[in-house]
Structure formats: structure tokens, C-alpha cells
Image (cartoon, helix red, strand yellow):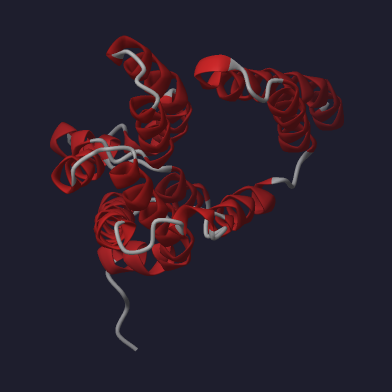
């Protein structure tokens, strides 16, 4: 059997994520039109912003008549988690040319990060760059396609956002996180982040998201530091 190129392998491995993200894009297109954005503006946001969570937040704030500085700061906070993704991928991507890292940084999503990071962490760093392009372009095309479908259906099915289709996205994120919870530090990080996210639910400007991320990082580092002396003792 002919081996699959890294580019196509990236597309293939991202297909399960596309299924979960499709309803999310569809709902976004519907909500954006309902919030008063034109079809062209909605598609332009998906093409040039390409950040699902931030786009939902921005559309909600636009619909509520929020000031632009508030919209910019809120979406910035929501997307700050991508800095953590970039830091995690840097050891593998440091040798990639800047002309490749720049577009890949734009196309970086939760789903592509999960797929690409797993590929690189499990020792398949060779071909990592085309693999990342395959995963990223698949997610990008999928998002544009279903944003457009949402725009077209928005006027025909105004109650589409209430159909519970966003459950597919929640299931996708659960599938991303669950395989990572194999060690005590990762379990501590998940528990701390979950507790802070629940306690901070409803905080303004999505600050609960950043607080949960910070709590998860601190808890994970603390748990890892508690394990290190035991490893050193075992190796002595």
C-alpha cells in the first residue's frame, strides 16, 4: 500500500475534528446574520479572524452594541490560550522557516493543535510541517464552508442556533482532552482549571477562561514539582 504523504495524513487525522466543528461554524453563520452582520462581513470574519470562540464572543458583543475597544480586548483575552499552544509547539517548530510558521500561527486552532501536538509528541516529527499544513487547511476550509452554509440557512431557519447542534463541539473538546489525562500533573491541571472555570462562570470579558488556564498551569507545575524528587530518589 502506498504511504500517505504527511500533508494528506494531516487532513485524514483531522477529519473527526471537522465533524465536531461543522455545526459550530453553521451556528456562527446563523447567529452573525441574526446579530445584524451582512453575509459578506460574516464570511470575511471567518476568513480573516478564523477563531471560533472569539467570533462568537465578538458577534454577541456587536449585537449588544458594545464599544469596539471592549470587543477587541475581550476577543484578545479569549484567544490568549493560543500563546500556550505556541509555547508547546515551539520545540518542534523552531527549525521551520518563518514563511511557514506565520501562516500556521494564523491557522492554529484547538483542534489542529491537538492533532499536530500528538503527532509530534509521539515521535513523528519528520514531516511535521506539511502535516500541520494539512490539518490547518482542512480546519480552515471546513470553517469557511459551514460559516457560508450557516449564512445561507440563517434567513430560512432563524431558530437553528437553538437546535443544540453545539453539543457536537463539546463532545469534540472532551475527546481532545480525555486522552491527555494520564498523569497526576495533567489530572491536577484539569481539576484546578475546571474548578476555577465553574467558580468564575459569568465573569466579564471571559476572564474566567484565562483564570482557569492560569490555575491549570500552576496546578500542573506544582504537581510535577512534587513528582520530581521521587524520580530523582528512584534514579539515585
Above or below 92: residue 214: above
Above or below 13: residue 37: above
Considering the image in quadrants, where does the N terminus appear?
A: bottom left
Quarter of the rendering containing residue 75:
top left
Residue located at (31% from left, 10% from top)? 69
Estimate the x, y position of residue 105 in percent, counting from the top left. Answer: 28, 35
Left or right placement of residue 98 versus residue 108 in this view: left
Estimate the x, y position of residue 157 in percent, counting from the top left. Answer: 38, 62
Considering the image in quadrants, where does the C terminus appear?
A: top right
Above or below 204: residue 188: below
Farthest residue to the bottom: give it: 1
Left or right placement of residue 79 versus residue 118 in this view: left
Residue located at (74% from left, 47% from top)? 182
- Residues 179 and 229: in front is 179
Left or right placement of residue 125 versus residue 208 in this view: left
Estimate the x, y position of residue 37 in percent, counting from the top left. Answer: 24, 38
Estimate the x, y position of residue 133 in percent, counting from the top left. Answer: 26, 52
Quarter of the rendering containing residue 186:
top right
- Residues 236 and 1: in front is 1
Is there any visible trace of residue 17 in the rendered image?
Answer: yes
Count of all numbered marks drawn on residues in the image: 0
- Residues 205 and 191: in front is 205
Left or right placement of residue 116 versus residue 34 in this view: right
Amino acid at each position: 500500500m502506498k504511504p500517505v504523504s504527511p500533508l494528506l495524513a494531516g487532513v485524514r487525522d483531522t477529519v473527526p475534528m471537522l465533524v465536531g466543528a461543522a455545526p459550530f461554524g453553521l451556528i456562527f453563520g446563523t447567529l452573525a446574520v441574526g446579530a445584524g452582520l451582512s453575509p459578506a462581513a460574516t464570511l470575511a470574519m471567518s476568513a480573516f479572524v478564523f477563531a471560533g470562540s472569539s467570533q462568537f464572543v465578538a458577534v454577541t458583543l456587536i449585537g449588544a452594541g458594545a464599544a469596539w475597544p471592549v470587543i477587541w480586548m475581550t476577543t484578545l483575552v479569549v484567544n490568549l490560550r493560543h500563546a500556550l499552544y505556541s509555547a508547546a509547539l515551539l520545540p518542534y517548530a523552531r527549525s521551520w522557516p518563518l514563511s511557514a510558521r506565520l501562516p500556521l500561527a494564523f491557522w492554529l486552532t484547538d483542534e489542529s493543535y491537538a492533532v499536530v501536538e500528538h503527532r509530534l509528541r509521539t515521535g513523528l516529527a519528520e514531516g511535521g510541517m506539511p502535516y500541520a499544513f494539512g490539518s490547518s487547511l482542512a480546519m480552515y476550509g471546513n470553517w469557511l464552508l459551514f460559516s457560508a452554509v450557516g449564512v445561507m440557512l440563517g434567513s430560512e431557519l432563524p431558530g437553528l442556533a437553538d437546535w443544540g447542534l453545539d453539543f457536537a463541539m463539546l463532545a469534540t473538546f472532551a475527546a481532545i482532552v480525555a486522552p491527555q489525562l494520564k498523569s497526576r500533573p495533567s489530572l491536577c491541571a484539569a481539576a484546578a482549571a475546571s474548578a476555577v472555570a465553574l467558580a468564575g462562570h459569568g465573569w466579564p470579558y471571559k476572564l474566567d477562561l484565562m483564570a482557569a488556564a492560569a490555575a491549570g498551569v500552576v496546578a500542573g507545575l506544582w504537581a510535577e514539582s512534587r513528582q520530581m524528587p521521587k524520580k530523582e530518589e528512584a534514579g539515585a
